């Protein structure tokens, strides 16, 4: 809880007083006025300590919103203005946090708002407790049980359009976290007489009307019902429709709620069938039928409704019909059947209807309980909500009112027990001096009613069970005798003659002084209602029904379980259940909601003082306040008290360091409150007089104003100061920044100006220097120039002088030379004439020679030996020299030419030279051979594998290897032969085989003969007498004759003997053929021979060779 929240209180913004304990002066009038004042301002809740008084506003108020729920959630009870939520929150939190089971007791008369209050409490708890899928389902089921129970248990009465006609107590179970687990509903005494009869202006239970107006046509058809309400005897017609109540819509709500709670569809149908059956039952009418014995016997008048009802329930029609006509009384041993007259038949019918309905209702509660019961067996915390009918005083009060008022009497007991006693115990607990306050304890009235021996209920039971004639009158007599002495019992016929003359007390009545007022009860019907008799024949007929729910509702109809014991009476049952309820409530922490009805007209703005006054009285509210104030009107724990009032004293304001109690003591002493006005408890301060509290409150309010002003002042001061400081800081920052900026600007300006000035000065200085330098340079240049010019001038002068001098010298020399020349010429003229001719000639010759050689040098021919050109001679006298020079030059260039030859080339040229020496101008074949190179070895014998054999024979270098024709000496025809020449010999071999034919040592060759013509014939002449010569000379022919002969010649010359071979060039020569010589004659051939050489043997001695002419 924050400090701020602590400041709000019940005492703030209060209309009247929120807590009646603080009422001053405390009178009934001021009490009512306070309620009225608050009621008129829409404040329907007022506290008496922790009890909530609730006035029915009869209009929707905007104080039940989700926001309100949040507002009251987790707040202390007195913190906010009075509200039912504050109570619900307190209860829920002490359940959750302090593990205390709670009960919420809602009392008040019919229409005071009890049921609404219980719903508000439940919805608040549902809103603040845990969330989650499972939890929400439980919540929903708990909340949805309400519409179902209201449909079946509520009805419109004159006091309340939605009056609960049963007492309801619901235990909501929570786990340790405060999440709801489930619930248990207990119901008390349904006003079942309403099923068959309703007072004027009232209705039957809602469900009948809802079913008829809300069910679909189909449903109605299957239930054999008609929508017309007027057709049913049990429904009162004068108030069939209620303002603001939509039966059809509510029917849908109820069906939906039943589904949510967990009713099966067939269960819903069964329930509706029973409701329909009750309506049908009401329509069954009887007529008398005279019997022989003179008694009237009842008969069903119109069997249609009976039939339909039996069809609906699966009941045997005859059995039911019989049950309406006869009654079987079973004694211990025998059965006696008596007939029923019409009145008895109607009684039986109504009894059946009432029982059927009340049992159905109890079954519904049980069925709902089954659905909403907690699933887990865990330890539970319980919050019980009791919404029970309030105290009722009618003009005509019967058994029901008696029972109801007894119940309220018991509740008052609890209230006294728990509240007043608790109050007093608190003083003891707190150690406050306390003298017991007297208050009216209604235990005596409870005793009057419930005492086991002499109590009214006990006597009623006794009367019901007594054999013999029992009537309501005998019961009253009994009361008159036994209770006559009781202070709270009044009866005209009692022994006590006190009331003998009291005409307000009829003879058939008795009166009880309840704690809430006197109530007159008419004894009529007490016995019957207590007996709650249902003829066994009827219950048996019901049990036989072919309808499972119906069977279930009438277990006593089971013939096997015939129980002759009477069932417990209604009074006994009620007493027992109230007893259990009370026990149950006593174990719990009670929370009270006292509901008050402001007017009788269900109007939202009427506050009827007398009516309220009456309720205030019988609810004992004044006593409640008095007890609370008897000792001390107000109490509060020290801490919150100090927190609330500490501003009233300097020592405690703003902080008290020390125990709160001492703080409060200091505070109260400082305020000079009289000692007797307060007491210090152990944990609380108790204030006796409300006025004291109000004084405190007033002072507090004033002080708060001052404080507010102070706080305001300080706050404003602080705020302004803060603002100022902020502004100051900001200003400094701004100024600093601005200054910085300005200085920067200025600096930059100065800097740039400086740079400008600097640059100007530097420029100026530089220019000065430049100028100086330039000046110096110019000076230097000028000096140089001047010097140069000066030097130039000087040099020129010198030059001129030197030139002049030279010229002079030259002139002198020339003149001298001329002079000398003249002198010499004069002197040597005579010598000149004698020698000059010779000398000039010599000189001229020399000159010409010089010219000639220089000229020759320029026109020299080429270095080629064959170049025949030679420059012409210019001077005749040099003819000899010229020719000689030509010859020398030629020799020289030939020598040069030769010098560049290799040995090989030299040999070739030597060979060629030799050939020319031998054949030039001698043989016509020669010129054609000049261009041919002499290759020698044409056949390349060494390389050719064909001549391998031949090669082996030749062990020297082959000089010539060529193919020649060997001329047959017999016919002149040629045969091809290989001609081989080596250094030492020459050989002839077969061309094809390489077979050597002839080998002749060179030494044996003496000469060669050839013609002068173009043919290739040659004869090898052998030395006479040599071994080779035996066969004679060889006559051969070859195109390469020149080469062969030349080589032969050279080889022979190179031999050891150095014999020259003779080459004879003759057109006619002799060849030695064996013994004789043959002449070979060469002729210039005629044209008939063509171009070829032919050779013919003319005769023994002549061989003619014709050679084509060139
Ligand atoms: N807190 C409330 N706010 C608005 N209307 C209320 C309130 N309490 C009761 N009423 C009205 O009063 C009628 C009767 O209240 P109800 O709780 O049924 O009375 P009770 O149960 O005491 O007989 C309700 O139908 C409703 O119209
Ligand atoms: Mg009610």
Image (cartoon, helix red, strand yellow):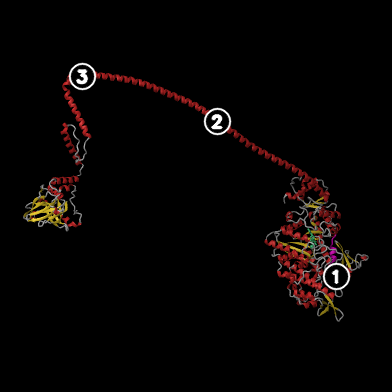
Cα distance in 3D space between marks 3 and 1: 216 Å
Specify whether 801 is left or right of 676: left
- Helix, strand or loop status at disc 1: loop
Q: Is residue 445 magenta?
A: yes
Q: Earlier in the sequence, mark 1 or mark 2?
A: 1
How busy is the neighbourhood of tag 2: few (under 14 within 10 Å), some, or many (20 plus)? few
- Helix, strand or loop status at disc 2: helix
The x and y percentages for residue 176 are: 70, 60
Q: Which residue is mark 2?
A: 756
Write the start and end of the magenta stretch as one range.
440-457
How busy is the neighbourhood of tag 1: few (under 14 within 10 Å), some, or many (20 plus)? few
Specify whether 744 is left or right of 89: left
The quarter of the image that holds ligand 1 is: bottom right
Residue 347 visible, this angle: yes
Specify whether 197 is left or right of 368: right
How busy is the neighbourhood of tag 3: few (under 14 within 10 Å), some, or many (20 plus)? some
Cα distance in 3D space between marks 1 and 2: 130 Å
Q: From the viewer's perspective, is residue 495 above or below residue 740?
A: below
The x and y percentages for residue 965 are: 14, 55
Q: Which residue is mark 3?
A: 825
Specify whether 708 is left or right of 964: right
The disc label shown at residue 525, or none: 1
The x and y percentages for residue 661 are: 77, 49
Q: Are marks 3 and 1 in contact (CB under 8 Å)?
A: no
Q: Residue at x 44, y 24 (%)?
A: 778
Mark nearer the viewer, 3 or 1: 3
């Amino acid at each position: 809880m924050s400090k701020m929240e602590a400041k709000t209180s019940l005492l703030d913004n209060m209309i009247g007083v929120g807590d009646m304990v603080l009422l001053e002066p405390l009178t009934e009038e001021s009490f009512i006025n306070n309620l009225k004042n608050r009621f008129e301002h829409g404040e329907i809740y007022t506290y008496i300590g922790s009890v909530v008084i609730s006035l029915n506003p009869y209009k929707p108020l905007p104080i039940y919103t989700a926001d309100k729920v949040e507002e009251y959630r987790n707040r202390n009870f007195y913190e906010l203005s009075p509200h039912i939520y504050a109570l619900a929150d307190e209860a829920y939190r002490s359940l959750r946090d302090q593990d205390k089971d709670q009960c919420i007791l809602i009392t008040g008369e019919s229409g005071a708002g009890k049921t609404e209050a219980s719903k508000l409490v439940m919805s608040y708890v549902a809103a603040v407790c845990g969330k989650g899928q499972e939890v929400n389902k439980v919540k929903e089921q708990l909340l949805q049980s309400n519409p179902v129970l209201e449909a079946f248990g509520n009805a419109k009465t004159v006091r309340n359009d939605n009056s609960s006609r049963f007492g309801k107590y619901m235990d909501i179970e929570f786990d340790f976290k405060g999440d709801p687990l489930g619930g248990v509903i207990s119901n008390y005494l349904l006003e079942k007489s309403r099923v068959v009869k309703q007072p004027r202006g009232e209705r039957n239970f809602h469900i009948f009307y809802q079913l008829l107006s809300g069910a679909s046509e189909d449903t109605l058809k299957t239930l054999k019902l008609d929508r017309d309400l007027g057709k049913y005897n049990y429904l009162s017609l004068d108030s069939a429709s209620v303002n603001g109540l939509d039966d059809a819509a509510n029917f849908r709500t109820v069906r939906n709620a039943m589904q949510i709670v967990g009713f099966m569809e067939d269960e819903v149908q069964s329930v509706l069938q029973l409701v329909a059956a009750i309506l049908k039952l009401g329509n069954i009418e009887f007529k008398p039928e005279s019997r022989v014995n003179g008694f009237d016997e009842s008969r069903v008048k119109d069997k249609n409704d009976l039939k339909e009802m039996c069809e609906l329930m699966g009941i045997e029609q005859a059995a039911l019909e019989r049950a309406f006509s006869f009654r079987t009384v079973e004694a211990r041993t025998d059965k006696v059947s008596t007939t029923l007259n019409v009145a008895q038949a109607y009684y039986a019918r109504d009894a059946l209807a009432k029982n059927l309905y009340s049992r159905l209702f109890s079954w519904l509660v049980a069925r709902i309980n089954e659905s909403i019961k907690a699933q887990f067996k865990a330890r539970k915390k319980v919050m019980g909500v009791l919404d029970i009918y309030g105290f009722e005083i009618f003009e005509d009060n019967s058994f029901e009112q008696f029972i109801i008022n007894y119940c309220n009497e018991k509740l008052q007991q609890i209230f006294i027990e728990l509240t007043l006693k608790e109050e007093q115990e608190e003083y003891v607990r707190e150690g406050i001096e306390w003298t017991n306050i007297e208050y009216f304890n209604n235990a005596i009235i409870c005793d009057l009613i419930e005492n086991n021996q002499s109590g009214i209920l006990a006597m009623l039971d006794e009367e019901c069970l007594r054999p013999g004639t029992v009537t309501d009158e005998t019961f009253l007599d009994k009361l008159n005798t036994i209770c006559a002495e009781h202070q709270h019992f009044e009866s005209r016929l009692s022994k006590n003659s006190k009331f003998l003359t009291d005409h307000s007390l009829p003879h058939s009545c008795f009166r009880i002084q309840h704690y809430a007022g006197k109530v007159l009860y008419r004894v009529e019907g007490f016995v019957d209602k207590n007996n709650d008799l249902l003829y066994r024949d009827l219950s048996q007929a019901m049990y036989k029904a072919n309808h499972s729910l119906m069977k279930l509702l009438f277990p006593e109809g089971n013939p096997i379980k015939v129980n002759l014991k009477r069932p417990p009476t209604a009074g006994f049952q009620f007493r027992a259940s109230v007893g259990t309820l009370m026990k149950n409530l006593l174990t719990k922490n009670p929370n009270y909601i006292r509901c008050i009805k402001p007017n009788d007209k269900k109007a939202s703005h009427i506050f009827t003082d007398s009516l309220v006054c009456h309720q205030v009285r019988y609810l004992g509210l004044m006593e409640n306040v008095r007890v609370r104030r008897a000792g001390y009107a107000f109490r509060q724990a020290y801490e919150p008290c100090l927190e609330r009032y500490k501003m009233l004293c300097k020592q405690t304001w703003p902080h008290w360091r020390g125990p709160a109690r001492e703080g409060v003591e200091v505070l109260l002493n400082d305020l000079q409150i009289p000692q007797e006005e307060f007491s210090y408890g152990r944990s609380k301060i108790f204030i006796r007089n409300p006025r004291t509290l109000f004084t405190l409150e007033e002072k507090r309010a004033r002080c708060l104003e001052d404080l507010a002003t102070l706080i305001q002042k300080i706050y404003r001061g602080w705020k302004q100061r803060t603002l100022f400081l902020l502004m100051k800081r900001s200003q400094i920052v701004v100024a600093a920044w601005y200054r910085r900026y300005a200085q920067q600007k200025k600096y930059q300006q100065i800097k740039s100006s400086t740079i400008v000035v600097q640059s100007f000065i530097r420029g100026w200085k530089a220019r000065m220097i430049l100028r100086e330098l330039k000046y110096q340079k110019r000076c230097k240049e000028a000096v140089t120039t001047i010097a140069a010019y000066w030097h130039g001038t000087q040099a020129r002068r010198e030059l001129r002088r030197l030139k002049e001098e030279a010229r002079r010298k030259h002139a002198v020399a020339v003149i001298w030379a001329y002079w000398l020349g003249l002198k010499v010429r004069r002197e040597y003229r005579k010598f000149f004439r004698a020698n000059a001719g010779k000398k000039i000639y010599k000189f001229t010759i020399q000159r010409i020679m010089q010219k000639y050689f220089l000229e020759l040098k320029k026109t020299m021919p080429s270095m080629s030996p064959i170049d025949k050109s030679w420059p012409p001679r210019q001077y005749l006298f040099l003819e000899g020299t010229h020719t000689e020079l030509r010859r020398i030059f030629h020799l020289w260039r030939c020598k040069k030419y030769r010098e560049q030859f290799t040995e090989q080339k030299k040999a070739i040229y030597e060979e060629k030279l030799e050939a020319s020496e031998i054949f030039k101008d001698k043989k016509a074949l020669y010129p054609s051979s000049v261009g041919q190179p002499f290759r020698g070895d044409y056949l390349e014998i060494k390389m050719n594998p064909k001549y391998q054999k031949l090669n082996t024979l030749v062990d020297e270098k082959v000089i010539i290897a060529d193919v020649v024709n060997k001329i047959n000496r017999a016919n002149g025809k040629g045969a091809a032969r290989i001609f081989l020449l080596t250094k030492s010999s020459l050989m002839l071999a077969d061309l094809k085989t390489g077979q050597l034919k002839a080998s002749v040592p060179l030494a044996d060759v003496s000469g060669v003969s050839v013609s002068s013509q173009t043919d290739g014939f040659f004869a090898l002449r052998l030395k006479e007498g040599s071994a080779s010569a035996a066969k004679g000379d060889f006559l051969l022919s070859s195109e390469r004759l020149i080469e062969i002969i030349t080589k032969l010649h050279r080889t022979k010359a190179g031999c050891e003997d150095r014999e020259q071979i003779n080459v004879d060039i003759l057109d006619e020569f002799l060849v030695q053929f064996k013994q004789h010589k043959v002449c070979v004659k060469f002729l210039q051939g005629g044209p008939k021979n063509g171009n070829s050489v032919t050779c013919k043997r003319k005769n023994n001695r002549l061989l003619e060779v014709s050679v084509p002419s060139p």
